[in-house]
Image (cartoon, rainbow, N blue to C red):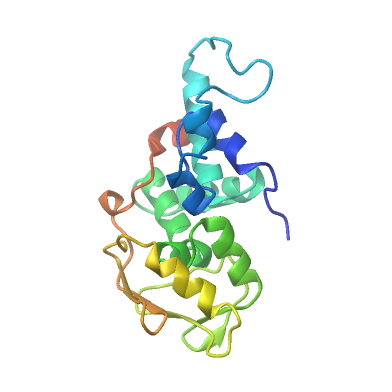
Amino acid sequence: MAKDTSPACKQCRREGLKLYLKGERCLTDHCAIDRRSYGPGEHGRRRVKQTEYLAQLREKQKARRYYGLLEKQFRNYYEKANKQSGITGENLLKMLEMRLDNVVYRLGFAVSRRQARQLVLHGHFTVNGRRVNIPSYRVKPDDVVAVKENSPARDSISEATDLTASVSPWLQADHDNLSGVILKYPERDEIDVPVQEQFIVELYSK
């Protein structure tokens, strides 16, 4: 299965803000963007001319990296969102939020989306009692996401819940039983992603 294997800290430095791709490390003094706030590479300190296209590209790259998707995967989500009724940018973010790996992260069962993706791939989670090992699986309202009863990762997942400050309002988490329920589809103001989705729509609409 294709995945982005590039260094997570360099991605944050390229975008100029924390994308929290490495979980707990991002909250410590070892966070790369706190230590070196400029872009990676020998040209990282150069002043870049700001253009409309660059602003649109940066927003798209930021969103893509935030959810851990490759370009083709992200483009497919955009095309599906564009065919739906409503605001395309909001549709895109809502579809990305309903991915199983993102829901596992939002419920607090993983310290980062990368860890959530790995846990799902290894079959540690069930949806409505059935094991699902596809990170892009789209959950629906009233679905129940839970850790497999005999999963060897239960201890590490429990440790991750201890680091969780809060759970998104469209989710309900039971950290004692390591399960959660999708209450509804998220609204735009309930998605705390530092992205201006309209720029993404403008980029792909060209």
193 to 178, vertically: above or below? above
* Residue 133 in the figure: left or right of residue 109: right
Whole-percent x, y for residue 183 in the image: 30, 73
Residue drawn at 47 percent across, 39 percent down: 29
* Residue 144 in the figure: left or right of residue 14: left
Q: Nearer the viewer, residue 97 or 22?
A: 22
Q: Nearer the viewer, residue 76 or 105?
A: 105
Whole-percent x, y for residue 61 in the image: 55, 36
128 to 86, vertically: above or below? below
152 to 188, vertically: above or below? below
Q: Residue furthest front?
A: 29
Residue drawn at 60 percent across, 43 percent down: 8
* Residue 183 in the figure: left or right of residue 125: left
Residue drawn at 39 percent across, 35 percent down: 198
Position of the N terminus, as image quadrant, is bottom right
Q: Is residue 183 visible?
A: yes
Whole-percent x, y for residue 185 in the image: 33, 64
Residue drawn at 47 percent across, 45 percent down: 26
How many marks overall? 0
79 to 102, vertically: above or below? above
Q: Residue furthest right?
A: 1
Q: Is residue 206 visible?
A: no
Whole-percent x, y for residue 86 in the image: 34, 50
